[in-house]
Image (spheres, helix red, strand yellow):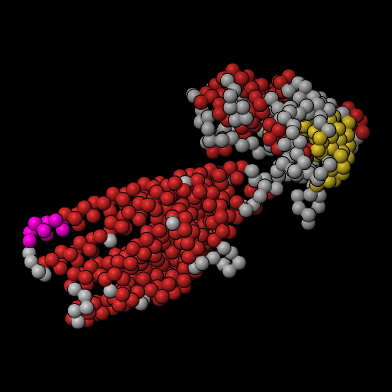
């Protein structure tokens, strides 16, 4: 019965707003496993609803008997018995209503917890392309506001839906036993109620979708503004940002008012229909009493039963609103859940648990989108485990793309990149990334202690290991100058550190992890040359026998690499060691001479 009620209610409400090509299964399908997981609570909650309503229908019977009894004689003791029974019924109702909330509402909170965790886990599998297409603020809005609306469907939505069905079933059955004619009079307005639910339901759904979309824009704006507050202040754009945020807020208010207007009209109309039913019952019942077709007690009992339908009838409109909002929000969440990771283990993935570090790239051509020019064209190179490869080139030449492909932030074409002789797409993602250490151009630090940031990739690392990694990255001395040293809490993205300090903490994080392959994308750009030399010396010791791919604009940092390639416009135009490339007199030599001149000018100043 419970499952039938829930399914039937979902089907009824969904038919009011789901598009013709959609079904309840496509909108709420992700919720079924959670409902099944906590079905025990829902079943027990439904039993409590049955008991609460079963007790509630006794009240009018007691009142009827009391009134009919008073019509013949007056006995104080008997009246006290009737009064006591009414009190007991009220207490029983209160107990069961409390238990309903402890089962159904608590169950909805547990489902919300599991659903949010699963949604977050799903986001962890998404590739860089997904996060480029959906702003962070929009994702946050879907994970909070939209998820809350869905939770309301699972809690109050289910509770009041089942309660409405059970109440109508029990009460109408009791009304029919008193007078089928009166029952028909009281139910005459019901078709009109269904029509209003249908018409208003679609409008509520559509307008709530617009509200949630606008809220996502506000969240995105706030997130971007706060993340880039330094830029905003440096360009003195505070007033413009305030005006733009106010504009978005005004649009949000307008969309909310549009929603409120339709919702505000809905409830009075539902109340009006209920009132019409009451008037019809009063008129018909009065006539029946005059004709002695029913007793006064029966009429009072019937009126009480009709009163018991007033709140469920009005609540029906509220429940429709909950389902409308929940469905609109679920559709927005489904956009995330329906998006499958485009970077995932392939069907022919091999059972590889460790890698040595040989890298072989063969005729690699890659474009981020089919309609744009390739970022890399016909790249081929070989790197043995333990060797250092330096990558040099102008800005925008495709160097970082190579790192993105080696980490599988983007998938390379099949048969173009091999690790230890195995196509990189056939290596399990977990194995590949567990053996890779990547330090990107833009370092990212979490709002946590320095200690936790350094051991992010190796949670079990001890204090001695953390400090040794920090010393190798030439950041230990700077950390010890902070009052709380390694327990110093960092602001968002490490905002309370300098650029060089952030880079060195990122390097310490990579050194601590001891990956088989280390990828550095201009990782020392914010560090002075003296500190750079110290870091490089330590890293050569720490990363001995580890493969290293190093991108840098400072050629001085790359002179001791085993191999150097020069990339220009996505192609390898030069390859060799430092001395041979200088002798060749190409772009490498040009960049080297230019940097020497810049360093000489800096010294002269």
Report the span colored magenta: 75-83
The answer to whether 378 is drawn above or below residue 371 in the figure is: above
Q: Name the magenta segment's main secondary structure.
A: helix
Horizontally, residue 263 falls left or right of residue 380, namely: left
Horizontally, residue 287 falls left or right of residue 404, namely: left
Q: Does the magenta stretch include residue 81?
A: yes
The answer to whether 135 is drawn above or below residue 441 in the figure is: below
What residue sits 76% from the left and 29% below the top? 355
What residue sits 44% from the left and 46% below the top? 40
What residue sits 56% from the left and 59% below the top? 25
Residue 292 image-quadrant placement: bottom left
Q: Nearer the viewer, residue 324 or 88?
A: 88
**Numbered marks: total:** 0
Q: Which of 319 and 526 is in front in this view?
A: 319
Task: Using the rendered image of the protein, determine whether residue 316 is visible from the camera's viewpoint.
Answer: yes
Residue 113 locus on image (x, y percent): 48, 44
Q: Is residue 84 magenta?
A: no
Q: Residue furthest right?
A: 584
Where's the C terminus, which quadrant? top right
The answer to whether 291 is drawn above or below residue 593 in the figure is: below
Q: Residue furthest top?
A: 464
Task: Using the rendered image of the protein, determine whether residue 312 is visible from the camera's viewpoint.
Answer: no
Where's the N terminus, which quadrant? bottom left
Horizontally, residue 406 falls left or right of residue 221, namely: right
The answer to whether 603 is drawn above or below residue 320 in the figure is: above
Residue 115 locus on image (x, y percent): 52, 47
């Amino acid at each position: 019965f419970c499952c039938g009620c829930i399914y039937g209610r979902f089907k009824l409400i969904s038919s009011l707003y789901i598009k013709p090509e959609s079904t309840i299964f496509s909108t709420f399908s992700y919720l079924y496993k959670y409902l099944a997981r906590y079905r025990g609570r829902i079943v027990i909650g439904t039993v409590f609803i049955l008991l609460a309503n079963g007790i509630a229908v006794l009240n009018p019977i007691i009142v009827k008997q009391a009134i009919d009894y008073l019509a013949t004689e007056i006995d104080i003791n008997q009246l006290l018995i009737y009064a006591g029974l009414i009190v007991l019924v009220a207490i029983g109702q209160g107990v069961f209503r409390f238990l309903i909330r402890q089962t159904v509402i608590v169950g909805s909170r547990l489902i919300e917890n599991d659903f949010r965790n699963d949604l977050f886990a799903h986001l962890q599998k998404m590739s860089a392309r997904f996060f480029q297409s959906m702003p962070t603020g929009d994702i946050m809005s879907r994970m909070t506001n939209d998820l809350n609306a869905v939770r309301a469907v699972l809690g109050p939505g289910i509770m009041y839906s089942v309660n409405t069905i059970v109440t109508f079933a029990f009460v109408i059955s009791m009304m029919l036993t008193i007078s089928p004619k009166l029952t028909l009079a009281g139910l005459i307005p019901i078709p009109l109620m269904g029509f209003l639910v249908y018409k208003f339901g679609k409008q509520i759904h559509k307008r709530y979708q617009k509200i949630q979309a606008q809220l996502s824009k506000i969240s995105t704006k706030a997130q971007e503004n706060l993340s880039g507050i330094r830029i905003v202040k440096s360009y003195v754009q505070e007033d413009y940002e305030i005006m733009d945020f106010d504009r978005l807020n005004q649009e949000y208010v307008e969309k909310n008012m549009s929603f409120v207007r339709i919702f505000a009209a809905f409830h009075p109309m539902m109340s009006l229909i209920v009132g019409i039913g009451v008037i019809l019952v009063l008129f018909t019942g009065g006539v029946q009493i005059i004709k002695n077709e029913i007793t006064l007690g029966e009429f009072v009992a019937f009126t009480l039963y009709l009163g018991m339908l007033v709140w469920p009838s009005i609540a029906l409109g509220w429940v429709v609103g909950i389902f409308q909002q929940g469905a609109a929000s679920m559709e927005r969440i489904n956009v995330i859940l329906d998006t499958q990771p485009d970077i995932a283990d392939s069907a022919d993935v091999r059972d590889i648990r460790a890698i040595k570090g040989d890298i072989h790239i063969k005729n690699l051509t890659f474009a981020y989108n089919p309609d744009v020019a390739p970022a890399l064209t016909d790249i081929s190179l070989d790197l043995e485990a333990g060797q250092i490869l330096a990558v040099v080139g102008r800005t925008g030449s495709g160097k970082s793309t190579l790192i993105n492909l080696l980490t599988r932030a983007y998938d390379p074409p099949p048969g173009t990149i091999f690790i230890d002789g195995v196509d990189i797409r056939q290596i399990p993602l977990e194995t590949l990334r567990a053996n890779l250490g990547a330090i990107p151009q833009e370092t990212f630090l979490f709002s946590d202690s320095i200690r936790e940031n350094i051991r992010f990739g190796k949670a079990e690392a001890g204090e001695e290991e953390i400090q040794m990694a920090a010393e190798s990255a030439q950041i230990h001395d700077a950390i010890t100058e902070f009052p709380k040293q390694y327990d110093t809490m960092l602001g968002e993205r490490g905002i309370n550190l300098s650029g060089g300090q952030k880079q060195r903490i990122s390097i310490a994080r990579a050194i601590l992890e001891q990956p088989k392959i280390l990828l550095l994308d201009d990782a020392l750009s914010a560090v002075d040359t003296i500190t750079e030399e110290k870091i490089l010396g330590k890293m050569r010791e720490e990363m001995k026998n580890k493969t290293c791919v190093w991108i840098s604009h400072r050629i001085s940092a790359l002179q001791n690499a085993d191999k150097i390639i020069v990339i220009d416009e996505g192609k390898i135009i030069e390859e060799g060691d430092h001395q041979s490339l200088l002798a060749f007199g190409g772009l490498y030599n040009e960049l080297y001479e230019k940097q020497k001149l810049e360093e000489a000018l800096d010294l002269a100043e």
